[in-house]
Amino acid sequence: MEFELAAEEGEFLVRLARASIEAALGAGEEPTLGDVSEKLMVPCGV
């Protein structure tokens, strides 16, 4: 699957990923790439 993102959309996804990672680290968890990807799919409607 290939698609293009506008700069604003890419920045939004980076902020979402960062927030997800920071929340997991704050809770004492060690997030994996799969954890972050799964959490991003929900807000993005994928």
Image (cartoon, rainbow, N blue to C red):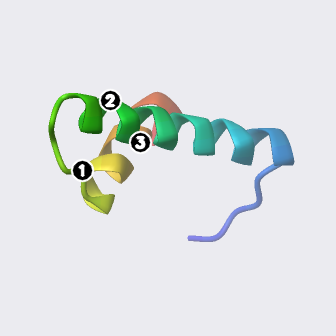
State which quadrant residue 41 falls in. top left
Between marks 2 and 3 in the image, the one whose residue lies nearer the viewer? 2
- Amino acid type, label 2: Ala
Residue 16: % across, % down: 52, 35
Single out the residue that lies furthest toward the left.
Answer: 28
Q: Helix, strand, or loop for circle 1?
A: loop
Q: Earlier in the sequence, mark 3 or mark 1?
A: 1
Q: Which residue is mark 3?
A: 41
Q: Residue at x 59, y 36 (%)?
A: 15
Residue 22 position within the rendered picture, expressed as x and y whole percent measured from the top left: 38, 35
The residues tagged by marks 1 and 2 sit, at their Cα atoms, a distance apart of: 9 Å
Quarter of the figure that contains the N terminus: bottom right
| 17 to the left or right of 27 | right
Q: Nearer the viewer, mark 3 or mark 1?
A: 1
- Give the alpha-carbon distance from disc 2 to disc 3, as whole Å: 17 Å
Q: Earlier in the sequence, mark 1 or mark 2?
A: 2
- Where residue 11 appears, as percent x and y from the top left, is 72, 42
Secondary structure of the residue carrying numbered label 2: helix
The residue indicated by pointer 1 is 31
Query: Which residue is identified by label 2?
Result: 23
Amino acid carrying mark 1 in the image? Pro
Residue type beneath disc 3: Met
Please tell me which residue lies in front, 44 or 11.
Answer: 11
Residue 2 drawn above or below residue 25: below
Q: Residue at x 26, y 36 (%)?
A: 24
